[in-house]
Image: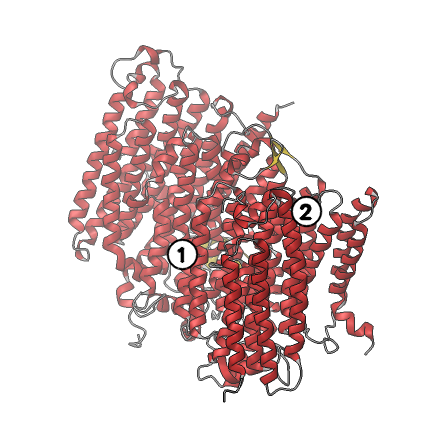
Amino acid sequence: MIAPKQLVRSIALLTTIATFVLSLWLIGPFLGAGSADAAGMIDIFGSSYGEKLHFVQRADWITSKNFTIEYFVGVDGLNMPLMVLTSFVGLLACLASWNFESWKVNKGIKGYFALFLLLETGMLGTFVALDFFLFYIFWEIMLLPMYFLIGVWGGARKEYAAIKFFLFTLAGSVLMLVGLVAMFFYSSEAVTRYASLATSYRPDVGVLTTGTFDLIELATNQAIQTYFNATDTYFLAKGLQFAPLMFMFLFVGFAVKLPAFPVHTWLPDAHVEAPTPISMILAGVLLKMGGYGFLRLCYPIFPAGGHHWAYCLACIGVISILYGALCAMAQTDFKKLVAYSSISHMGYVLLGVAVMTDAGVQGAMFQMIAHGISSPMCFFLVGVIYDRAHHREINRFGGLWLSMPKYGTMATIGFFASLGLPGMCGFIGELWVLLGVFAARDTFTWAVPMAILAASGVILTAGYILWLIQRVYLGPSKPEHAKFPEVTGREMLILVPLAALCVLFGILPKHLLFDFTNGTLDLIVKTMAAAPERFGSLAAGL
Amino acid sequence: MTLTEMLMPVAPELTLLIGVCAVFLLGVSKRPAVRSAIAPLTLVILLGSLVATAMCSDLDASGLVGLAFDELTGYVRWITLAMGVLLLLVNWRVPTDGEQGEYFGLMLCSIAGVLLTASANDLVVLFFAIELVSVPTYVMVALSRTDQRASEAALKYFFLGALSAAVMVYGFSFLYGLAGTTTMMASGGDSLQATFAEVGAINAFAVVGLLLAMAGLSFKVAVVPFHAYAPDVYEGAASPLTGLLGFLPKLAGFVALIRLLTVCHWALPDSLMWMMWIMAVATMIFGNVLALLQTNVKRILAYSSISHSGYMMIGLLVGPVLGEGPMHDGVAAVLFYIVIYGLMNLGAFAVLSGLNVRGEAAETLDDLAGLSRRAPMMAIAMAVCAFSLMGFPPTAGFLGKVYIFSSAFSLSDAHPFHGPLVTLAVIGVINSAIGAVYYLRIAGYCFLREPGDGLKRVGGVMPGLGLAVCSLAMIVLFIRPTDLVNRAKSATASVGSSVVTRVAVAGAETPPSDTRPQ
Amino acid sequence: MLTIGLMHYLVLSAAIFCCGIFVMITKRNAIGILIGVELVLNSVNVNFIAFDRYSQQPGFDGQITALFVIVLAAAEAAVAVAICMNLYKNINTIDVDRGDALHG
């Protein structure tokens, strides 16, 4: 008979394993371009993004006259890698939760794993939802388990950290809610005014006649696009252009999650207080939702808004890179350092998206995945040593490599990947983003200085990571650390796949990611780049 | 027409009133067995009234002076009686032995008052119906507890309530002076509605009358600056009763406001519109900000109740729209939201009433600390209600808020108050984020704090059942809101038709601005 | 010679209304406040009857309404006195300033 505690963990682990295996299934249709007639697939005609959606499922959820909220999910090149990443990190985080009873706060194992699985549901739902309303609901639902996971099972200042995390994200998503509602009614206005353009991408709909929450529809329907992005569509008051304003409403919500510079302050607190597996998920998956939101919502639906704010966003991206790196350098708390490095790394995502070039967007996407692999590894490495030392003061460590050689090796791989060493996953993303910024120099006056600044972020990163490795792993072994047990088999089970992926993604970026994503990303970039010519004033008659 | 036929449409109200007599009479019995049967009897009466509501589908009011029945009446009857059952369950053990007769009798009176408010077609009937809702609640506050706070709260509630009723009826007298009749709507002949169609709402009597009537009703729904009683009364009354105070008077107030606005064709004079706009903003901000400063959960919920009235004011100002979905209809959104609000508010108070700290009823945030360790199910129910009040998915409170706010967004540019109303909705959205802070604090105390000593579960099966229904309903209504939403929408059919009447009668130059092309 | 018209009654009722409000605000004795409420309700009655008397429409709507309001005022007074007695039982006074159990 298995003890109940064992049973709870086992169920959670089996569930996450099953989820991971099923998520691998999603890759299927993306292997090779020729498998065009896989089941459950929609062709979107027109030169729009999301050329191929796979595994589409639709059902009406809340319906009444003129108004439908759908359960609409589907997978394309943009969310497929993130889904796989989520289920992968979820599985590893579940393994990392295995020593639950050795945590100081030993309570409620059932509650913990139930919330853990709810969190994974929320994350997967957010990535897979293609109806804005559904997306928003998953986006919010995800907050609940996170709040409790940090607040109940966290460290000393857990309550403060949990509330801060919750309120920051909620404040961001409040504006998204305004956007959600406004977009629905403006789309209904659009299809009424420009009925001739309102051809839907869905053959079964034909011409769209009502407002919609369908994210693909919002991005591909010409009537909606024309109306949303026109310079004289206003919101709230005359003079407040719709597209830039809505873009900002959505952007703020995603920027909090990313997190970008002025709204990042919840992240270090949340990370420091969260238990290790939750930190892994937080860094590995939750932060990606910000970047995913840009690419799924902001840019395809409001390309004009993207152009409007391009400088502003690129600047925020550069500031995040430098600020995050400088803060990381100043930390003495191991986990806080990794947290600030996350801010720095996600700055590249913002920068890459903001310049709206092929390479920039591809780099941003790659950086998301790369960071999704390297940062959970870093947080787990911190967790491993915290389990043994029960503190995270960098300056009190030293010479760990001598007492724990396997751990030292793994740590080096993880941190070098995070550093962006050529041949490791972090390198490709940053390089592509920088290339993307250079590529934008014709349209973007300050592209070159920005690229130089961003590149100097790489140097700062190298600085704090090498210094970290020196302080923690190198040097003479300290007597209080000498008796630390070497990493266990379970810990290796978590570290080795992550380390392998860190290297593999550095060597085979094309085969592991770009082949899957670039089809979708190219179309998004095409939409974005075409914006200034395509959208003018409605009054001028287009 | 026989007497039976004549009275058939008011069968639900009559059932309740006969029940009131029976309950009052049984309440004076000296035999404990009889007295303990009163609560079940009240339940039977409420269920009987529900059955009567279901049966009297033929609502011919021709035999009854001062009453009219439409879809709104039916909707309000259903939700009031259904909520009444829950209110009864939660209040099951509130009255001390010997006072059950009075307490439950008065509760039935109050419920009957709400039903009458929804069918009133005459200012006098409306006034009396509102008073029938309120006066019993004053007494119930005094009965609900035996300590000084309850009697103080009752006195305060009574005086402010009586004043507001007097102000309201003073306003009604001007409306009567304007129209020469107290009939609100009539298909032919004199009525207030017809008068408004003729003179518009710019007449001095009309403005003064509407202003005073709305001020009086604002008290019932606890809108700033007529909110002052709410925190004290909520704190003074027993928790289960507070759940009732947050629902019945508010529902009656909103229904009366809807009726009144229907009478003036949803075309308030600009000055009144702006006044209501400012009141709505002040209500949301004031309620939320002051709730942040409280440590007593009942006071937090009182201020939250004020801010929720502010949200519902948005829907009221947007008004009804014919022929569109519920996302477009402010009144339908209010009617939907008030049910959700009643449930989640009652749930939160039911949790408080089910807890005892060192022999006293739980009231402060500290009393709730560590609830998840002592009574996990109660803590979960509290969290569900708190998140619903916050307007957070996956709870029905989220959908309620979405409907309210989106009704403002659905107005077309041509609407004279388009800009201000959308701004109002944006202010509402921001306010709901501010509100999140204190609801989160409630949930946080339940789950994140270490339990203090002396926290105990009390109460019996019935309050627990009521609580379970409330919190489950929050989830269920989120997953499947369609039925209730569509009912709320169809309840506004006759309310919305008055908008069209205005155009037809007054020959307004712009087409009905808030109906959008398909 | 001054003829008494509708306006005079309205001014009278407004004056009574204001007196009632004033009494409610200034009195500290619960019974005093109750008297203020009654004054306000009586101003309503004056209004209804005056409007009825001067309206062109047939019928006695206003006067009947005034009767109803009087009945209601009586009922309210009964409730008020009951609540006052309840308070008196608790704090031995009906001076509303002495009630301070609620931190409002």
Residue pointed to by mark 2: B91
- Image quadrant for the N terminus of chain A? top right
Chain to which the residue tagged by mark 1 belongs: A
Left or right of A316 in this view: A148: right
Q: Nearer the viewer, residue A535 or B35?
A: B35
Q: Position of residue B318 (x, y in %)?
A: 48, 68
Q: Nearer the viewer, residue A361 or B88?
A: B88
Q: Are marks 1 and 2 on the same chain?
A: no
Number of numbered discs: 2
Chain to which the residue tagged by mark 2 belongs: B
Residue drawn at (52%, 62%) of the image: B218
Q: Nearer the viewer, residue A348 or B172?
A: B172
Q: Type of residue at label 1?
A: Gly
Q: Position of residue C104 (x, y in %)?
A: 49, 47
Q: Position of residue A470 (x, y in %)?
A: 24, 22
Q: Type of residue at label 2?
A: Asn
